[in-house]
Structures are given as structure tokens and as C-alpha cells.
Image (tube, rainbow, N blue to C red):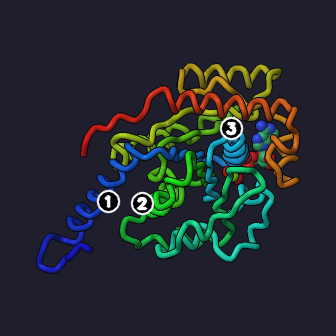
Amino acid sequence: MVSVVDGPSAEESFRRWSDRVLDHAVCENAEQAMKTIAVVNQKGGCGKTTSAVNLSVAFARTGQRVLLVDLDPQGHATMGMGFNPDAFEQTVYDGLVDRTVPLSRVVVATEVNGLNLLPSNVGLAGAEIHLHNALGKELILGEWLRTESSRYDMCLIDCPPSLGLLMLNALVASTEVIIPVQVHFYAFEGLKRLLETIRLLKARFHPCSARTLGLLLTFVEDRPRYTRKIQLQLHELFGDLVFNTVIHKTVRLVEAPDAGHSIFTFAPDSKAAREYMQLAEEVQARLRESEPVFVGT
Ligand SMILES: Nc1ncnc2c1ncn2[C@@H]1O[C@H](COP(=O)(O)OP(=O)(O)OP(=O)(O)O)[C@@H](O)[C@H]1O
Ligand SMILES: [Mg+2]
């Protein structure tokens, strides 16, 4: 514990303490096997939950041990996996506000072999207020997830649509970031700010990690000329950062979560199922492409 009595100022003490925690986190991240991918965009309804759920299932279907973290008080990922968010005694909220709660006690197994879920519900909305004055408030989720990192190969975090403390926790906890972008006139809105936030967090918290793995184009329609134009602009602006795989607009991806299933169970022969499996392969390839380089403390 840091002592602030007749020593350095509280601010300086906190800086030293957080640097120690961060250095430790950075080194662990450089070595540990578990990949933690935050699916983020502060823009609402662009396909974050759909992508987090279906990517998690795709990874589990290829034999990986996967943890899906529902970090959104809307509880959509929890519902998408077929659960009633209000039925849980403990959720992500409990782990964030009480550091003595073991992750293993909150995790639930899903109907998909190899895929576990950290559920959430509307109670998580209170976490931001609770965490506001906590020491190292951006680090709490990462510390909690690391306690079980040897049990999983992949951890996907479904983020809420706001640049608040929950999303900052997700970004700091992550080794990689995927940004779903709805191909629409408003696609560029907020994207610059999000990328700048990720860059700042990377500089401060992850000198060797938390890279943006890719921009995922969602709700793609082949016919309207304006969507092709937006796609082109996104490619011009972000180049190779844009995944080759795109997710087309389809009613199947609306119906599947309503039935409490992933697209692979709900419509295994659909184009959407093929696209999410292809995305999982592309993500794996990008993960292998360049491992984070450790640059020291
Ligand atoms: N490719 C798609 N085609 C058609 N509908 C889709 C597609 N992807 C997602 N949807 C639907 O669009 C809605 C929003 O998707 P989703 O919940 O994944 O977005 P989100 O970014 O997680 O939203 P929020 O910001 O509220 O968390 C949902 O009803 C979902 O079923
Ligand atoms: Mg969502």
C-alpha cells in the first residue's frame, strides 16, 4: 500500500503506484497467451454486440477456450447467448465494485462448447459512479480478467456505446481492439475521436500492446451507390486497417439474438455465418501477423 504520510504528495504516490501496476500489467501482457479483444465504438447500433457474440462462438467452434465479457448494462450479449440478464445473482458489476469476488464465481458456461460468459444487466450502469473515486479505476477490469487468463485463449469484451469508464476499462484491459463501423453517412462521426482515445490510452497504459486490429465494415449493402462510396472512403482513409471481410446487412442477424442463438446455430448455412467464420480466420491471421513488441518500462 502507498503511504502518503510525510512522503510524496498523494498525486505523486498514485502515479508511482499506478506505474508499478502498469509496468507489471505490461510485462504480463507481453508474455501471457490470452488475447483480449475489445469490440468498441461509442456509436450505438453499429454491430458491436453482434460481432462480439458471433466472433466468440466462431473462435469456440475452432477449438479455442473463449470468455465473452458483456460490459454493457443493456445486457445484449447476455441475451444474445440465450440468458435472461436479470436471472443472475452476480454479474460483471460485482467483480468491478468488489475486488474480492472471484471471476470464476461470476462466469457461466454457455450452450457453446468452450465458450463462457461474464454476464451483465442494467445494474452495471451503477458501476461508473461506484468506480469514480477508486484508485486505479481504469485498471480494475484488466486486473480481474488476468486472474483467470490461463484458463482462456481468447477474451472478447462487448463494450457499451459511450466513451465512459467502462469502455476505458475495456480498452486498458485489452491487447487488441476491433472497431465495427456501420457503412453509413454517419460512419466517420466519432471515429477520429475513438482512434485518438485508443492512441492516448496505448501511450499511457500499453506501451507494447492494445493495438487496433481492424475496422470491421457492417451493414454492408452491395447495391446502393452511396454505400460503395462510403466503403471506398473508409478504405482510402484507413487502408489495410479495414478488414477484408465485411458483414452484409441481413435480417438473419436480427432474428438470431431474438431467438437467443448465435448465427451459427440459428442459420448455419447463411451468408452471415460464413462471413463471421471468415472474420474469425482473418482476426486469427492478424493476431499471428505481428505480436506486440515490448519496448521496456
Ligand atoms: N449485419 C447486420 N445486418 C442487419 N442487422 C444487423 C446487423 N448487425 C447487427 N444487426 C442488428 O442491428 C441492431 C444493432 O446491432 P448490435 O446490437 O450488434 O449493435 P451495437 O453496436 O452492439 O449496439 P449498442 O451500441 O446499442 O450496443 C441489432 O438489432 C442487431 O440484431
Ligand atoms: Mg451492443
Q: Position of residue 103 (x, y in %)?
A: 55, 66
The residues bearing labels 1 and 3 have C-alpha atoms spaced at a distance of 34 Å
* Residue closest to the eye, 187 or 154: 154
Residue wearing tag 2? 139
Q: Where is residue 34 in the image (x, y as percent from the top left)?
A: 50, 47
SS assignment at label 2: loop
SS assignment at label 3: loop
Under mark 2, the amino acid is: Leu
Q: Do the residues labelled 2 and 1 touch (CB within 8 Å)?
A: yes
The label shown at residue 124 is: none
Under mark 1, the amino acid is: Val
The label shown at residue 62 is: 3
SS assignment at label 1: helix
How many neighbours does mark 3 have within 10 angstroms: few (below 14), some (14-19), or many (20 or more)?
few
Residue wearing tag 1? 21
Q: Position of residue 271 (x, y in %)?
A: 83, 29
Under mark 3, the amino acid is: Thr
Instruction: Say if disc 3 is inside 8 Å of ligand 1.
Output: no
Q: Residue at x 47, y 71 (%)?
A: 131
Instruction: Say if disc 1 is inside 8 Å of ligand 2.
Output: no
Judged by depth in the image, the label closer to the viewer, 1 or 3, is 3
User: Is 80 situated left or right of 269 in this image?
Assistant: left
Q: Position of residue 213 (x, y in %)?
A: 52, 34
The residues bearing labels 2 and 3 have C-alpha atoms spaced at a distance of 30 Å
